[in-house]
Amino acid sequence: TPSPGERAPGAGSFAMSSADSDEEEYEADEAVVSLIACGLTSAPDDLDPQAVTTVNLHGNFIRQLGTSLSSLTKLVTLNLSSNHIEAVEGLGALSQLRTLNLACNKIAKVEGLSGLVALRSLDLSHNLVSDVSGFYELDAESSALAEVRLKDNLISAVRDLLPLRSAGKLSLL
């Protein structure tokens, strides 16, 4: 088993590219970091906060987010699907984040959304969500949230979804 932040031997691949080039240029205006199925047990904490706009950590073994991603103030897209995450934490400083994919994790409670003022798309499908009261953290009038996916969860109190009434697309089934 790899220690936190390490990759399992022979696991996955690392790719980083810019929007302007096929080369692995880290100093580009828009950097994409893709660490898919690399056996990571934690999110990397050494990414350039001035360059990185997209992070894809799909298919790893991440259990906790901590604050490792909180410095990425230019982050627009974050994919943490298919990990082992139990709680949404440490993302409140990501004020430019528009797309957050947390599908296929172990999240039981919606929380940690305050501060995500630009968030337009949230995918929490295929989790263990039964408590959605965290949606009340969002300011319903100024929220940019347009799409929420909650398919295949344990939600029983639909009334708790009232803060999402302004979302353009709500997928529960």
Image (cartoon, helix red, strand yellow):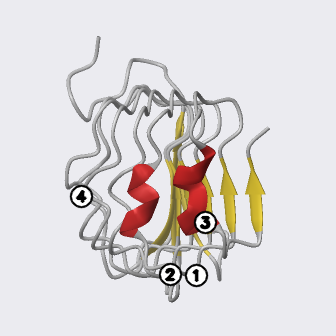
Are dots 3 and 4 in contact, CB under 8 Å? no
* Element under disc 4: loop
Q: Is 46 located above or below residue 132 in the figure?
A: below
First of labels 3, 1 by sequence position: 1
What residue is shown with label 4?
A: 46
Q: Categorize mark 1 by other alpha carbons within 10 Å: few (<14), some (14-19), many (20+).
A: some
Instruction: Check whether the beta carbons of the residues at disc 3 and disc 1 lie within 8 A of each other.
Output: no
What's the residue at 65%, 77% (across, down)? Answer: 21
- Residue at the (49%, 87%) spot, across then down: 29
The residue drawn where x is 71% and y is 38% is 151
- Residue 130, given in percent of the width and then of the height, sits at 49, 33
Please state the horizontal and vertical placement of residue 121, each as a whole percent of the image: 63, 65
Please name the amino acid that badge 3 sits on.
Answer: Leu
Q: Residue 106: percent from the left, percent from the top?
A: 45, 27
Residue at 79 percent of width and 38 percent of height: 173
Residues 49 and 138: in front is 138
- Locate the N terminus by quadrant: top left
Residue ID for mark 1: 144
Of residues 98 and 114, the one nearer the viewer is 114
Q: Name the N-terminal-most of marks 3 and 2.
A: 2
Residue 10 lies, in percent from the top left, at 48, 19
N-terminal-most mark, 1 or 2: 2
Mark 3–mark 1 distance (CA, rounded to whole Å): 11 Å
Mark 1 vs 2: CB contact within 8 A: yes
User: Measured along the vertical axis of the image, is residue 86 above or below residue 51?
Assistant: above
Pick whichever of labels 3 and 4 is earlier in the sequence: 4
Q: Which residue is mark 3?
A: 164
- Looking at marks 4 and 2 on the same chain, the residue that comes earlier in the sequence is marked by 4
